Amino acid sequence: MKRGIQGFVLHGVLGGAAFVTLLPLLWMLSASLMPTGEATALPPRLLPTSLTLEHYRTLFTRLSVARYALNSALLASGVTLISLLLNSMAGYAFAKFRFAGRDPTFQTLLAALVIPGQVAMLPLFLMLKEMGVINTYWGVIIPGMASVFGIFLVRQYALSIPDTLLDAARIDGAGELRIYWSLVLPACAPILVTLAIFTFMGTWNDFLWPLIVLTDDRMYTLPVALANLSGEHGQDIELMMAGAVLTVLPVAVLFVALQRYYIAGILSGSLKE
Amino acid sequence: MRHRINPAYWFLAPALSVIAIFFFVPVAASVVLSVTDFDIYAVASRVNLRFVGVGNYVRLLGEPLFWVALKNTLYFVLVGGPLSVGLSLGVAVLLSAKLVRFRTVFRTIFFLPVVTTLVAVAVVFRYVYHPRFGLLNYALSLIGIRPIDWLGDPNWAMPAIILMAVWKNFGFNMVIFIAGLQSIPERLYEAADIDGAHGWAQFRYVTLPMLAPTFLFVAIMTMIGYFQLFAEPYVMTQGGPAHSTLSIVLFMYQQGFRWWNMGYAAAIAFVLFTIILSLTVITMQLRGRQSALPNVGTR
C-alpha cells in the first residue's frame, strides 16, 4: 500500500516535470500553426482554432528560409565529415602508436580544453580575413576541421582495439593507410557515429562564430537568420515560431532517433582517465 | 619493413596542424593583440597599430561597464549554476528510483531541451515571458500573482534568463548523474540498511560521498559553460534593460566585432580566461582535499 502511494507520487512529480519541460516546445509548435494574431489572444491559447501552414509558406517564399537551411545543412555536414576523418586519424595514432612526444602532446591538448574558444576568436577572425575566407563556408568549416574533444573520444575507444589484430595485418603486408581504413575505422564505428552526431548538432546549433564570420545575408545559417529575423519581424509571433520549429526540428529528430549513441558519447566524454 | 618516419606522424599531422594553426596560434596572438591598440583603423591598415602595454587592462579595470558585465556574469554563474546542478541531481535521483516506469521516455523528454538550438529557444522564451500574452504570466495569474515584466524589468531580466538556461541545461548533467548513481555498488545501500540508515541518511552518507567525483566534474563543466553566457542576452535582451543582462562575452563581442576595438576585446577575453582558470583550479583543490575517496569513475 505504501509502495503504491510512493509510486503514484513519484510518477506524478516526474509527469508534471516532463509536462513543464515539454510545454515551451509544444507551444512553439502549436503557435507556428495558428492563424496570424491568435498567439496574442487573451487569455493565451494553447491550441490553434484552425491549423494553417501560411507562416511556413511565408518563410519559404518571402524570407528564403530554404537558403538558410541549405547553408546550415552544408556547413554541419561539411564540418562533420572532415573532422570525423581528421579526428579519427589522430585519435588512432595517439591510441595505437609509440612515438616521441606522444604523452606530452596529448596532455597539452587536454589541458587546452580549459581555454574558452572566445580567447582565440579575435585573432582567428583577422587570420581568416587575411586568407579571404570571411563570409564564405570555409570561414566556418576551417576552424571546425579538428577538435581536441573528438580526438580524445576516438583515442579512448581505439585503445581497446587489440594490437595483435593490427600486427597480423602488418605481417600480411597491409599498408598503414589500409589498416586504418579497413580495420580501425570499422572497429571504431560506434564512437564515430557518436562523434558525428555531436559535431553535426554542435555546428547546426552554433551561433557566435557564424554570426561573426558570415556577414552577408545569403550566407546566414538558420540560427543567425532567426536572430536577425526576430529583430525585424519580432511582433509576428506565429511566423517566428514557425522559424524556430524549422531550426529545432532537424536536430530534435536526429537526437530522438540516435539518442543511444548521443548519450553514450556524453558518458565517455565525462569518463575519468 | 619499418618506415623511416613513424607513420603516426602522418596520421597526426592534419588534425594537429589544424588545431595548432587555428587554435594555439590565435590564442598566443590574442596575448599580443591585447597589448596593442588594434582598432578599426588598424583593421584598415596595420600602420596604425601601436603597442600599449597593459593599457587595455588598466582601461578595462576603470570601465564601469566591465564591472557590470562581470557582476551579471557572476550572478548567472553563482545562481544559475547551482540551480541547474541541483535540479539535475534531484531529477536524476527520482529517475533512478526502482519504482520508476517508462524511464527512457522521461529521460528523453528531460534531455530534449539540451539538443535544441539556443537561438530558437531564446526566441520562443521571449514570448513565453511576454508581460501581456506570455504563458508564464498567465500561469502565475492563475495562482494570483500579478504580471511581471520579465525581460523589461532590470530586476527580473537576469532571473528570467537563468530560468531559461536551467530549463535548457539540466538534462545534460542529469544524464551524467544517472550514470554516477548507477555506479554506486548496491552492497553499500544494503550495509547502510543493516546499520539502520534509511532515506535521507542514506542519501547524505552513501549517495552524496560516492557521487563526489561526478559532482566535481559536473560543477566544473557547468561553471565553465555558464561563464560563456552570450546567445541568451544577445537574442532576448541585447544586454538590457539598463545593462542588467550584459555578460562578459557579450561585452567582448560588442567591443570586438561591433566597434572593432579588437585589442581591448582581446584583453576582455583574457580576463575571462583567467577568471575561469583560477576558479577551476580552486574548485579542484577544495574538492581534492575534502574527498580522499577512491576514485569512482562516472560510469
Image (cartoon, coloured by chain):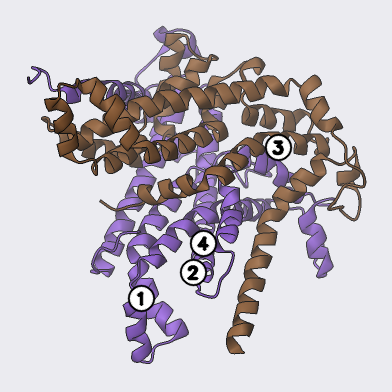
- Rate crowding at label 2 as few (under 14), some (14 to 19) or many (20 or more) other CA atoms within 10 Å: some
Secondary structure type for disc 1: helix
- What is the chain identity of the residue bearing mark 4? B
Compare marks 1 and 2 and give the one earlier in the sequence.
2
- Rate crowding at label 4 as few (under 14), some (14 to 19) or many (20 or more) other CA atoms within 10 Å: many
**Which three-letter amino acid code belongs to the residue tagged 3?**
Ala
Secondary structure type for disc 4: helix
The chain letter of the brown chain reads: A
Compare marks 4 and 2 and give the one earlier in the sequence.
4
Q: Which numbered disc covers residue B258?
A: none
**The hue in which chain B appears in the rendered picture of the protein:** purple
C-alpha gap between disc 3 and disc 1: 45 Å
Question: Could you say which quadrant of the image residue A66 lies in?
Answer: top right
Which residue has dot 2 on it?
A: B96
Q: Which numbered disc covers residue A244?
A: 3
C-alpha gap between disc 1 and disc 2: 13 Å
**Which three-letter amino acid code belongs to the residue tagged 1?**
Glu
**Residue B148 shows in the view:** no
Q: Are circles 2 and 3 on residues that touch, CB within 8 Å?
A: no
C-alpha gap between disc 2 and disc 3: 33 Å
- At 66% from the left edge and 66% from the top edge, which residue is drawn? A15
Question: Could you say which quadrant of the image residue A33 lies in?
Answer: top right
- What is the chain identity of the residue bearing mark 3? A
- At 80% from the left edge and 20% from the top edge, which residue is drawn? A61
Residue B17 in the image, given as x and y percentages of width and height: 29, 21
Residue B271 in the image, given as x and y percentages of width and height: 39, 39
Which residue has dot 4 on it?
A: B88
Q: Are circles 3 and 4 on residues that touch, CB within 8 Å?
A: no
Which residue is situated farthest in the front direction here?
A: A172
